[in-house]
Image (cartoon, helix red, strand yellow):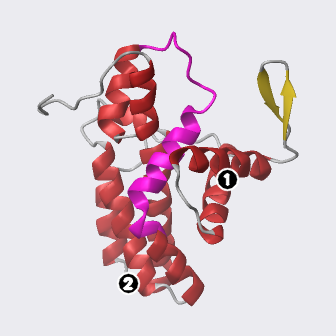
Amino acid sequence: MTRNAGKQDLLVIGSLAGFFYEVLSNTARKLQLELSHPVQSYLVSLLSSRARQDYDPRGLEPIGPELLKALAEKSAAKRLSILKRIGDRALYEGGYFAARLVDSVLDVDYYRAIGKDAYQVLAVEHYKQYLRRLFSELAARFKDLSILLGEAAESGHYSPQSNLADLYNRWIATGSRQLAERLRSMGILPVKPGMDT
């Protein structure tokens, strides 16, 4: 629920899941991105669970070798669990922490590829039909969903005083339409290096 409190809207939410539902709904609307109910519920659950943890991706095992280990795992139940954890991690870090990946050796595209692969395997191997459909949709829309999470992370955290170079670098890394619009509103024409103007 949104209430007008002077010039700014005040978001009144009764739960963490409700908060993330509103943020994702508003961000998806701004991006003109349609979300199926299962995907939106999954993303709300992912963000809510991460918010309850002291999540810091630094110090975690590299995601690529973790995927290789999962694919070699003999136990189907364990393999599915690891693949879900990898897909979720790649989606979350490639979206919410995309700015951290700008100067990283492993960029956003790497995380998107790993996460998409993990979800694609789940879409084929999972024993529950409705989860196969869910993971298939997550894999097919991984880039858009990653951008959605990045934009959701940005909502309310940006001010015109933010570092322009940082904003531009995040746009280069993510390809976000909303970041491109912010740059344009600041008088900057977003052009990726190597593109002709």
Q: Is residue 65 above or below residue 174?
A: below
Q: Is residue 140 above or below residue 54?
A: below
Question: Could you tell me the amino acid type at mark 1?
Answer: Ser
Kindly state the secondary structure of the residue where label 1 is placed.
Answer: helix
Q: Residue furthest top?
A: 161
- Tell me what residue is drawn at x 63 percent, y 61 percent: 40
The spot of residue 98 in percent (x, y) is 42, 38
Q: Tell me the magenta residue range.
A: 138-163
State whether the magenta stretch is mostly helix, strand or loop.
helix
Q: Earlier in the sequence, mark 2 or mark 1?
A: 1
* Residue 56 visible from this viewpoint: no
Q: Is residue 87 above or below residue 31?
A: below
What distance separates the C-alpha of mark 2 from that of mark 1? Answer: 28 Å
Find disc 2 in the rendering and name its residue. Answer: 74
- Tell me what residue is drawn at x 34 percent, y 41 percent: 175
Find disc 1 in the rendering and name its residue. Answer: 49
Task: Name the residue nearer the viewer: 145 or 94.
Answer: 145
Query: Where is residue 107, by image quadrant?
Result: top left
Task: Name the residue nearer the viewer: 57 or 124.
Answer: 124
